[in-house]
Image: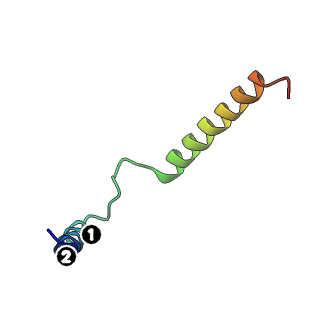
Amino acid sequence: MNFHSAAAQLVTLAAEGGEHGGNHESLNPLLTGGGALFVLLLLLWITTRFNRDR
């Protein structure tokens, strides 16, 4: 398989998958982003509690 045929297959696959939009109906972007922000802030808080000497 050379580069040209692999690229052609990927283009075909992307064109077929574009019909669905790529988003799942049950995923709320605001809830997902808020949850990720909360987890990162929690990890930052835990890290700063263990590094009191700095």
**Image quarter in which the N terminus is found:** bottom left
Placement of 34 over or under 12, stated as above or below: above
Q: Quick one: 42 or 28, which is closer to the camera?
A: 42
User: Which residue shows up at 48% across the image and 53% down it?
Assistant: 29
Q: Quick one: 25 or 35, which is closer to the camera?
A: 35
Instruction: Determine the image quadrant of residue 13.
Output: bottom left
Image position, residue 9 (x, y; %) = 17, 71
User: Which residue shows up at 62% across the image and 39% down it?
Assistant: 40
Placement of 21 over or under 4, stated as above or below: above
Q: Which residue is mark 2?
A: 8
Q: Which numbered disc, 1 or 2, marks the residue that appears first in the sequence?
A: 2
Q: Quick one: 43 or 5, which is closer to the camera?
A: 5
Q: Quick one: 42 or 3, which is closer to the camera?
A: 3
Left or right of residue 16, residue 39 in this image: right
**Image quarter in which the C terminus is found:** top right
| Outermost right residue | 53
Instruction: Determine the image quadrant of residue 41.
Output: top right
Could you tell me if the residues under marks 1 and 2 are in contact, i.e. CB atoms within 8 Å? Answer: no
Q: Which residue is mark 1?
A: 18
1 vs 2, front mark: 2
Q: Which mark is residue 35?
A: none
Instruction: Determine the image quadrant of residue 45.
Output: top right
Q: Tell me, what colour scheme is on the image?
A: rainbow
Q: Amino acid at mark 1?
A: Gly
Q: What is the C-alpha distance between the residues marked 1 and 2?
A: 15 Å
